[in-house]
Amino acid sequence: MKKLSVTLLAVFVLSVAVAAWYSNNITLQSGNYQNTGWNQTLTIAANSDVKFTGSTNFAGGHLIIKENATLTIQSQGLSANGSITLEAGASLIVNGNLALNSGSSILRINKGTVTVSGNLTQSGPMEIGTGSVMNVNGDISSGNGGITILPDGRLTARRFTLNGSNNVSGFMEATQSVLINGGSLNFSGCGDFRTPALEIRNGNLFTGNGFVAVTQTFSNGRSSGWSGHPLTNSNGIGVFYGGPANNANWGAATMTSSATNPCLSILPVSFEKFKAVPQTNNNYMLEWTAPENEETESYEIQVSDDNINFRTIEIVPAKGQKGDLRYQQKVNLGF
């Protein structure tokens, strides 16, 4: 009886992840891109939905996310050695940490949204523009680059560690704590800064005109017989403190019993839509919607450089019509 000899041939297919490295300027349309890297200008096309899977290598150059486009970094975060710009309606979603590694790594958000699931480390400057939102689920550690939040811009994180010069005309909030090692926070407009716990390492760090709410604890280096570093030398800054009674030194700040920013509560509740868009040469475009049952002869626009003394710069006649009444008025602050 013959024996059959059977030979088994095993075929192994090695799957190799394809890397995409861009050393020239390029624009990407909607799709998934694996192991993506670049050192020139990489543009995410307008209205597209792009996902980077695998590793992302931002060695230099510029990342531009055009109008109404979304870029999602699906894994391993984003480490940037160049600048990032978001145009109106654009979104950047980083699953992991975001690092701006050098002083030339500039993040600018123009009416867009940035969401970071991990931490943010910042060496270069960040600008959260008017109508822009940045949410960091973890901590923000800011170097000397500084943070600028324009009117109607919003920045939130779990904890902040701040250095350098920072400017707040919008809304800035920590859900747990803020530590200011050095530098300053300069407020303008209706700048609003909120945190449960605040610790400062130097005095008179807060300048300008704005509102600060510290709901639990304030630490300013004070010890027995010493009131600690003063928070501010500006009486244009209002402070709400919800913590225990102590002899903490708030400096020249105006204390308030309400956690509501008085600058933001001047308008009647009926004004659900109101915004001020900054333009050139200290001009602003004011836009608001009056209630349907408008019973006003005119709107008096006032400004103040200390949040105490106000002066009228424009009087806008009311339209006196029924329906959705939308107003637009260009003004110059005059200071």
Image (cartoon, helix red, strand yellow):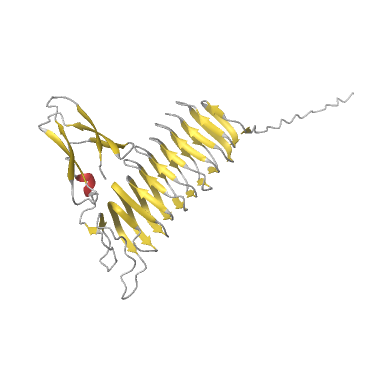
Q: Is residue 147 left or right of residue 254?
A: right
Which corner quadrant of the image does residue 300 belong to? top left
- Judged from this view, the residue extending furthest toward the bottom is 225
> Count the marks: how many?
0
In the rendered image, residue 89, in percent from the top left (x then y), is placed at: 39, 31
Q: Is residue 122 left or right of residue 250?
A: right
Give the answer, above or below, for where 230 lies relative to 209: below
Where 130 falls versus 46 (above or below)? below
The residue nearer to you, when weighing 280 against 291, is: 280
Q: Give the residue displayed 30% in from the left and 70% down from the top.
A: 227
Q: Nearer the viewer, residue 232 or 57?
A: 232
* Residue sitting at the far right: 1
Decide: is 7 above or below 248: above
Q: Position of residue 162 (x, y in %)?
A: 42, 55
Q: Quadrant of the C terminus?
A: top left
Residue drawn at (49%, 47%) of the image: 124
Q: Position of residue 271 (x, y in %)?
A: 19, 36
The N terminus, quarter of image: top right
Q: Where residue 53 sits in the image (x, y, percent)?
A: 56, 35
Lateral position of residue 172 relative to residue 80, left or right: left
* Residue found at x 34% / y 73%: 223
